[in-house]
Image: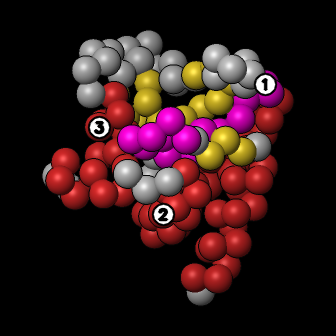
Amino acid sequence: MSNNDLQPILELDGEERYDYFLDAVVDERDIWILVNADNQFLKIVAEEDGVAYLPVWPTREFAENYAAGSGDLSPKAISLPDFFRKWVPGLTRDGIEVGVFPGADEELWITAPEELKQDLQEVMSSAF
Protein backbone atom coordinates (compact mmCIF):
# COMPACT_ATOMS: atom_id res chain seq x y z
CA MET A 1 0.00 0.00 0.00
CA SER A 2 1.46 3.37 -0.97
CA ASN A 3 1.16 6.57 1.04
CA ASN A 4 -1.47 7.71 -1.47
CA ASP A 5 -3.53 4.64 -0.59
CA LEU A 6 -3.10 5.21 3.16
CA GLN A 7 -4.02 8.91 3.23
CA PRO A 8 -7.79 8.68 2.57
CA ILE A 9 -8.12 6.08 5.34
CA LEU A 10 -5.97 8.09 7.76
CA GLU A 11 -8.24 11.10 7.16
CA LEU A 12 -11.37 9.22 8.29
CA ASP A 13 -12.72 10.26 11.67
CA GLY A 14 -11.98 8.17 14.77
CA GLU A 15 -15.19 6.11 14.59
CA GLU A 16 -14.77 5.35 10.87
CA ARG A 17 -11.14 4.31 11.47
CA TYR A 18 -12.32 2.08 14.34
CA ASP A 19 -14.76 0.30 12.00
CA TYR A 20 -12.06 -0.02 9.33
CA PHE A 21 -9.70 -1.44 11.96
CA LEU A 22 -12.19 -4.09 13.09
CA ASP A 23 -12.85 -5.31 9.54
CA ALA A 24 -9.17 -5.29 8.53
CA VAL A 25 -7.99 -7.09 11.67
CA VAL A 26 -10.65 -9.77 11.33
CA ASP A 27 -9.56 -10.30 7.70
CA GLU A 28 -5.82 -10.38 8.46
CA ARG A 29 -5.95 -11.94 11.97
CA ASP A 30 -3.15 -9.64 13.21
CA ILE A 31 -2.99 -6.46 15.25
CA TRP A 32 0.06 -4.23 14.76
CA ILE A 33 1.91 -2.36 17.49
CA LEU A 34 5.20 -0.45 17.57
CA VAL A 35 8.20 -1.62 19.57
CA ASN A 36 11.59 -0.07 20.24
CA ALA A 37 15.02 -1.67 19.87
CA ASP A 38 14.58 -3.37 23.27
CA ASN A 39 11.29 -4.91 22.07
CA GLN A 40 9.31 -2.70 24.50
CA PHE A 41 5.93 -1.66 23.13
CA LEU A 42 5.00 1.97 22.57
CA LYS A 43 2.71 3.25 25.31
CA ILE A 44 1.33 6.77 25.17
CA VAL A 45 -0.04 8.75 28.11
CA ALA A 46 -2.65 11.31 27.06
CA GLU A 47 -1.72 14.80 28.27
CA GLU A 48 -5.24 16.00 29.04
CA ASP A 49 -6.42 13.15 31.27
CA GLY A 50 -3.36 10.99 31.94
CA VAL A 51 -4.88 7.86 30.37
CA ALA A 52 -2.21 5.37 29.30
CA TYR A 53 -2.92 3.52 26.08
CA LEU A 54 -1.36 1.11 23.62
CA PRO A 55 -1.74 2.43 20.05
CA VAL A 56 -2.69 -0.32 17.57
CA TRP A 57 -3.04 -0.45 13.78
CA PRO A 58 -4.73 -2.81 11.30
CA THR A 59 -1.69 -3.29 9.03
CA ARG A 60 2.10 -3.00 9.01
CA GLU A 61 1.88 -0.08 6.55
CA PHE A 62 -0.23 2.08 8.87
CA ALA A 63 2.08 1.37 11.84
CA GLU A 64 5.15 2.17 9.72
CA ASN A 65 3.53 5.40 8.53
CA TYR A 66 2.87 6.46 12.15
CA ALA A 67 6.45 5.63 13.18
CA ALA A 68 8.05 7.43 10.22
CA GLY A 69 10.75 9.75 11.52
CA SER A 70 10.82 8.25 15.01
CA GLY A 71 14.04 6.36 14.36
CA ASP A 72 13.88 3.46 16.78
CA LEU A 73 10.27 2.23 16.47
CA SER A 74 9.36 -0.71 14.28
CA PRO A 75 6.07 -2.54 13.63
CA LYS A 76 5.36 -5.86 15.29
CA ALA A 77 2.41 -8.16 14.61
CA ILE A 78 0.37 -9.74 17.37
CA SER A 79 -1.87 -12.59 16.29
CA LEU A 80 -5.51 -12.29 17.34
CA PRO A 81 -5.33 -15.43 19.53
CA ASP A 82 -2.27 -13.98 21.34
CA PHE A 83 -3.97 -10.62 21.70
CA PHE A 84 -7.06 -12.22 23.21
CA ARG A 85 -5.19 -14.68 25.44
CA LYS A 86 -2.17 -12.65 26.62
CA TRP A 87 -2.49 -8.97 25.80
CA VAL A 88 -6.09 -8.28 26.86
CA PRO A 89 -5.60 -9.69 30.40
CA GLY A 90 -2.17 -8.03 30.72
CA LEU A 91 -3.33 -4.60 29.55
CA THR A 92 -6.40 -4.84 31.79
CA ARG A 93 -4.27 -5.81 34.80
CA ASP A 94 -1.86 -2.92 34.13
CA GLY A 95 -4.66 -0.38 33.62
CA ILE A 96 -3.67 0.33 30.01
CA GLU A 97 -6.37 1.16 27.48
CA VAL A 98 -6.12 0.59 23.71
CA GLY A 99 -5.87 3.53 21.29
CA VAL A 100 -7.31 2.13 18.09
CA PHE A 101 -5.75 3.24 14.82
CA PRO A 102 -4.29 6.72 15.35
CA GLY A 103 -4.79 8.73 12.16
CA ALA A 104 -4.24 12.16 10.67
CA ASP A 105 -6.54 13.97 13.12
CA GLU A 106 -6.24 14.39 16.87
CA GLU A 107 -9.32 12.24 17.43
CA LEU A 108 -8.59 8.75 18.72
CA TRP A 109 -10.90 5.91 19.73
CA ILE A 110 -9.66 4.76 23.14
CA THR A 111 -11.31 1.67 24.56
CA ALA A 112 -10.83 -0.93 27.25
CA PRO A 113 -8.97 -4.03 26.03
CA GLU A 114 -11.94 -6.27 26.90
CA GLU A 115 -14.32 -4.06 24.87
CA LEU A 116 -12.05 -4.23 21.83
CA LYS A 117 -11.90 -8.01 22.19
CA GLN A 118 -15.71 -8.18 22.30
CA ASP A 119 -16.06 -5.92 19.24
CA LEU A 120 -13.55 -8.03 17.29
CA GLN A 121 -15.33 -11.23 18.29
CA GLU A 122 -18.67 -9.77 17.16
CA VAL A 123 -17.24 -8.90 13.74
CA MET A 124 -15.65 -12.36 13.51
CA SER A 125 -18.93 -14.12 14.31
CA SER A 126 -20.89 -12.03 11.79
CA ALA A 127 -18.26 -12.69 9.10
CA PHE A 128 -19.09 -16.42 9.05
Say which residue appears at 52% left-offset and 61% top-offset. Answer: 16
Q: Secondary structure at mark 2?
A: helix
Residue 51's label in the rendered image is none
Give coordinates of residue 121: x percent, y percent: 69, 67
Number of other residues with Cα within 10 Å of mark 2, as a class: few under 14, some 14 to 19, many 20 or more? some
Spatial separation of the CA atoms under disc 3 and disc 2:
17 Å
Q: Label the magenta part by its dominant secondary structure.
A: loop
Q: Which residue is mark 2?
A: 20
Q: Amino acid at mark 3?
A: Asn
Q: Secondary structure at mark 3?
A: helix
- The residue mark sitting in front, 3 or 1, is 3
Q: Amino acid at mark 2?
A: Tyr
**Quarter of the image with the C terminus in it:** bottom right
Magenta residues (range): 94-107
Q: Which residue is mark 3?
A: 65
Say which residue appears at 19% left-offset and 48% top-offset. Answer: 3
- The residue mark sitting in front, 1 or 2, is 2
Say which residue appears at 64% left-offset and 83% top-offset. Answer: 126
Instruction: Decide which of 88, 85 is in the foreground and name it.
Output: 88
Give coordinates of residue 93: x percent, y percent: 83, 30
**Is 24 positioned to the left or the right of 90 in the image?**
left
Please, is residue 91 above or below residue 37 in the view? below
Residue 94's label in the rendered image is 1
Give coordinates of residue 79: x percent, y percent: 52, 51
Q: Amino acid at mark 1?
A: Asp
Residue 114 at least partly seen: yes
Q: Quadrant of residue 100?
A: top right
